[in-house]
């Protein structure tokens, strides 16, 4: 959706559903689409994700957050919140569908079998491919790259390199 159209749509939906006295703005989130801050009476939306979503996906996100605003912080994603989200016209699902557009992480881990995972933040400890081994397995250790450039354990950081040396790889 065009970014300049997102906040006016959100404000319209918020007015429609009784939270017009709340504010709405963009944030820098890259994984979560929205957040409700009850203490500040504010809904924030991911600038990155809203630019990737179509209007129906933006609407779903805004209604999801409006449901949080209406039921209060104590409800999280419980049945009360779910019923309110559905009443407003949202799906009532807790998480963004895996089919939705996403912002890839700059850190990419690749296992020896070729599976990949991406992360927004630098890895803090060695990890192995969860598809190949349910528990840590040195045979399935992820090798990391940052923005497409391979990174050695020492370049990741001294704590990472020490942990790797202690993992008996």
Image (cartoon, rainbow, N blue to C red):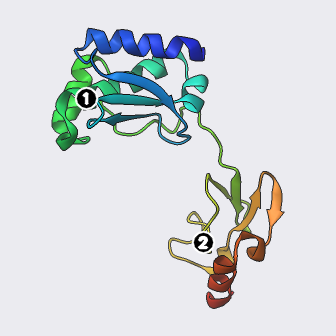
Toward the front, the furthest residue is: 40
The mark found on residue 127 in the picture is: 2
Query: Looking at the rendering, in which quadrant would you find the N terminus?
Result: top right
Q: Residue at x 45, y 10 (%)?
A: 8
Q: Residue at x 60, y 26 (%)?
A: 52
Q: Secondary structure at mark 1?
A: helix
Q: Is residue 154 above or below residue 72?
A: below
Locate residue 158: give its quadrant: bottom right
Q: What is the CA distance from the residue labelled 1 to the residue labelled 2?
A: 37 Å
Q: Position of residue 54 (x, y in %)?
A: 55, 18
Mark nearer the viewer, 1 or 2: 1
Please name whichever residue, 121 or 165, is drawn nearer the observer in this view of the structure.
121
Question: Does residue 26 appear to the left or right of 11 in the view shown?
Answer: right
Q: Is residue 55 left or right of residue 41?
A: right
Q: In terms of secondary structure, where does tag 2 sit?
A: loop
- Determine which of the numbered discs, if any, sits on residue 69 in the image: 1
Q: Earlier in the sequence, mark 1 or mark 2?
A: 1
Characterize the local packing of mark 2: few (<14), some (14-19) or many (20 or more) Cα atoms within 10 angstroms.
some
């Amino acid at each position: 959706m065009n970014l300049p159209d997102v906040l006016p749509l959100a404000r319209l939906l918020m007015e429609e559903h009784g939270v017009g006295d709340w504010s709405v703005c963009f944030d820098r989130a890259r994984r979560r689409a929205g957040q409700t801050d009850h203490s500040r009476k504010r809904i924030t939306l991911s600038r990155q994700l809203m630019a990737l979503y179509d209007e129906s996906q933006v609407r779903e996100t805004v209604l999801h957050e409006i449901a949080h605003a209406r039921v209060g912080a104590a409800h999280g994603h419980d049945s009360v919140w779910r019923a309110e989200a559905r009443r407003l016209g949202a799906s009532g699902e807790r998480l963004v569908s895996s089919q939705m557009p996403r912002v890839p992480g700059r850190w990419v881990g690749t296992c020896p079998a070729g599976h990949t995972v991406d992360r927004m933040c630098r890895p803090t400890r060695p990890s192995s491919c969860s598809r190949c081994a349910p528990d840590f397995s040195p045979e399935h250790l992820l090798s990391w790259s940052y923005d497409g450039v391979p990174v050695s354990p020492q370049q990741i950081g001294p704590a990472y390199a020490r942990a790797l040396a202690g993992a008996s790889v």
